[in-house]
Amino acid sequence: MSNNIPSARTMGTLPVFMTAVSTILGAILFLRFGYAVGHVGLMGALGIIAIGHLVTVPTALAVAEIATNQKVEGGGAYYMISRSFGLNIGATIGITLFLSQAISVAFYVIAFVESLGPLIQWIETLTYIHPFVKEWILNSRSLGVIMMSLLTLLMLSKGANIGVKALYGVVFVLAISLGMFFLGDSTAPNGNDFYRTIKNHDDFFKVFTIIFPAFTGIAAGLGLSGDLKDPKKSIPKGTLWATIVGIIIYVCVAIKLFYSAPIWNLATNQMVMADIAIWGPIIPIGLGCAAISSALGSIMIAPRTLQALGADKIFPGSLSSLFSKVRKKDGEPFNALVITCIISFAFILLGDINTVAGVISMFFMVTYGIICLISFLEQFAADPSYRPTFKSRWYLSLPGAILCFWLMFKMDFTYAVSSTIIMILLYIWVNNINKDKKGLQKLFKGVLFQLSRQFQIFLQKRDTDASNEEWRPFIISVSKDSFKRQSAFNLLRWLSHKYGFGTYIHFIDGFLSKDTYEESQNIMDRLLKQNEGLKSKVYLDTIISPSYTSAIAQVIQLSGVSGKGNNMILFEFTQDEKESLNDAIQNYQLLRATEFDVCILRSTIKGFGYKKDIHIWIRPNDFENANLMILLSYIILGHPEWKQGEIKIFSTYPPTEKAETEAKLIELIQEGRLPISPSNIQLIPQLKEEKIDLIISKKSADADLTIVGYNSDQIETESDNTFNKYPDLGNILFVSAHKEHTIE
C-alpha cells in the first residue's frame, strides 16, 4: 500500500548519514556531556553512553532490517511501523513520533539560543540600546521565538532542499569544532578516579533522561525516506554509519572532558568545552551549527510524518486531506509544516531545555521500543512475506525493546504512566475512527500462529502416556444442518467454554471441485458471521465429502485444535428428521473402534428452556457411562449461560440394592468434588413390571436437559428405538463412553 505522496526522490545515502550524524552530534553533546561527567563520573557517563546505545544500536539494526523488507515510502519510521503492525497501531505510534519530532525542533532552537552566550554578553555592553529593548532582545524566550520565526520562514520558502544543502556545511563546522576541542590541553585534574562526582550530584537516571536525546539522531534519516532514490540501500547504510561514528565520538568526548577540567567545573559550566578547546569561540559556533542543523533535520522530517498520516486517512473528515496536501512546485508538505512550527513555538515558550529533553526522551523511548518489538515479532512470526535483505537478530531486538520500556519507568515514572495512558487513548481514538483498518489482530496474528504450532508440537512430543492424564473433552461435531438449528453447536460451545476443546464442521455432500470449494468458502463466511456475537470458543470449519461416513472417517483422524487428537463426537437429530439419527447409528461401530465417546443429541422445539435443570439418569446397565455423564453435566454448568443451573441425579435400582447403589453414587460425588448436593440424588426402585422409559418421562418432563446412557448392545437389539423413546421430554443427550472415565 502506497501513500501516493509525490516526491522528487533525488537523494542518496549521504543525506541520511548527514541528517543522522548532525543530530547525534548536536546540542546535548556540547551543552550537557560535561554536566553528565560531573554528576555521575566518567564511568557513569560511559555507562549512560553504553545503555543509550543498547537501545539505539538494536533500533538501528531493526530499522535497517524493516527498511530492506519493503518499498519504503514517505513517512519514515511511521511508514515502516504501520506496514508491519497495521495502520491503527502505526498511526498511534506515528502521532507520538510526530509530536516528538515537532518538540525536538523547539529543543534544538532553545539549545541554539544558549550557544549565543558570547553574543548576548557583548550586546549587554552596548549603551546605545534602550534598556527595555535590550531586556526584550536578551530574553531567552524572545530569542527562541525570533530564531524559530526565521527557521519557519526559511522552510516555508525554500523547503527541505535548503536544509539538506546546509547539512554539508554544518557537518564541516562540527568536525572543526570537535577537532579543536580534542587538541586542547589535558591537564588530568581529576586523576584516575573514574567514579569521582560532585557532592549532592543528580540521580543516574535523571542524568540519563537529559542526555538521551543525544542518541535519538539515529531515526533522523528515516524521515527522508520519501525523498530517497533507493531507501532500502540508503537508510541502512546511512543510519548504521552515523551510529558507529556517534558512539566513537561520545566516548572520546567523555574521556577528554574528564581529563581536561575539574569535576566541579564540568558540573556547573555548560560551555566548559570552550574553555578546553585551543580556540574557545569555535565551540559556541559548533554548538550553534549543531543546534540549527538538528532543528533543520527535525523540521524536515516531522511534517513528512504528519503528511504520511494524512495520506493514510488516519484523521477524521477533511483533516487528513489538509495534512497530506503538498505544494505543487516542490512537493513540500506545506500544511504539515505549518502545524509543526506552531507546536514548536508552543514548547519554545517553556524555555527550559531540561524539561523539553525529558518529554523528547519519553516519546523517542516509546518509538524505539516499538521498532525493536516489530523486528522481534516479525522474526518470531516467520511470515514468508517478511524477507529483508538485511537481518538483525531477535536476541538483540527483544532485549532492546524490554530495555526501552524498563528505562521509561526508571527515567520518570509519572511521564511513563502518562505516556502509556496517552498511547492507549490514542489507539482507542484512532481505532474508533478507522474501524476498517488493521489493528492489534495484525500485530499478533503471526506470533499466535507460531506459538500455537510450538505448543502443539510440544504437547505431541510429551504425550507419551495418555493413561495418566486427567480427562477433558476434545469434541468434534459434523453436521449438514448448521443453518436449520443450533442445538448441537450450542451444546458444543458450552462444553468447550472452559474445560474442553470443540470443533464444529459443516458437512457438504459431494466431490471436491471449484463449485463445491466456493460453496464451502461461502458457508464458512456464514458460520463466522452467525457466531460473531456468541463469544464462542469453538473452532469452525467445513468438509466436502461424497458421503457422511467418509466425512466422519476423515475428521476423526484429524488433530484437534488443542494439538491433541479428538476423543468425542457429537451427533444431533430431531424426531421429525430421522436421517441424521441413521447416520449416527451407521457410524457408531466405526467410532467405537477408534475409542471415541459417542454422544447423540435429540433436539426438540422445547430447546434448553431456562438452562437451569440438568437431569442425569443412571440405570443398572449405565454405570460405565455414569462418570462421563456426570462430567459432561458439570462442564456444561461452567458456562455463564448455565450459572443458575443445578444437577440432579436419578438412579434406578433393584429393590434389594438400594443401600449399595446410594453409597456408590455419594462416594462418586464426594471423591470427584462435584457441586452436587446429596439431596439432589434420588434413588428410584424399579419393579419388574415398571418401564424405566415411563419413569424418566414423568420425572424429567420439565428438565432443560436430560442425559441418558446407552451402549452397543442397545444399538444392536433396539437400533433407532433406543433414541425415539421419551416423546414428551425436551432435549436429550444420549451418552456412550468407550470406557469408564475417572472424575477424581
Image (cartoon, grey):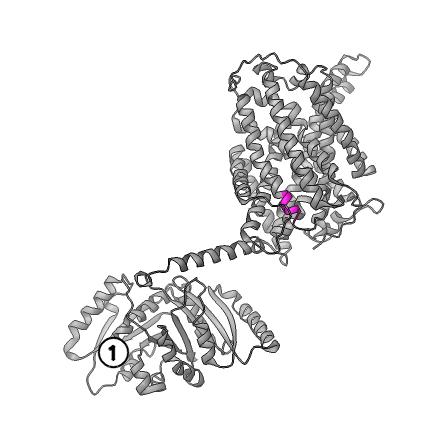
Q: Quadrant of the N terminus?
A: bottom right
| Residue 532 horizontal side relative to residue 91, left or right | left
Residue 141 appears at what percent x and percent y?
71, 26
Q: Is residue 64 magenta?
A: yes
Q: Is residue 567 above or below residue 89?
A: below
User: What predominant SS class does the magenta segment belong to?
Assistant: helix
Whether residue 18 is visible to the viewer of this picture, yes or no, is yes
In this rendered view, identify the residue nearer to me: 236 or 339: 236
Residue 712 appears at what percent x and percent y?
31, 81
At x 40%, y 58%, the residue is 461
| Residue 727 horizontal side relative to residue 361, left or right | left
* Amino acid at pointer 1: Asn
In this rendered view, identify the residue nearer to me: 317 or 150: 150
Q: Quadrant of residue 111?
A: top right
Whether residue 703 is visible to the viewer of this picture, yes or no, is no
At x 60%, y 36%, the residue is 56
Q: Is residue 742 above or below residue 302?
A: below
Q: Residue furthest right?
A: 329
Q: Residue furthest left?
A: 656
Instruction: Determine which residue is flagged by label 1.
Output: 621
Q: Quadrant of residue 614?
A: bottom left
| Residue 515 horizontal side relative to residue 179, left or right | left
Magenta-colored span: 63-68
In this rendered view, identify the residue nearer to me: 686 or 710: 710
Give the class, few, some or many, for how many residues have Cα within 10 Å of label 1's Cα (few <14, many ≥20): few
Residue 520 appears at what percent x and percent y?
56, 74
Residue 126 appears at what percent x and percent y?
79, 13
Label 1 residue SS: helix
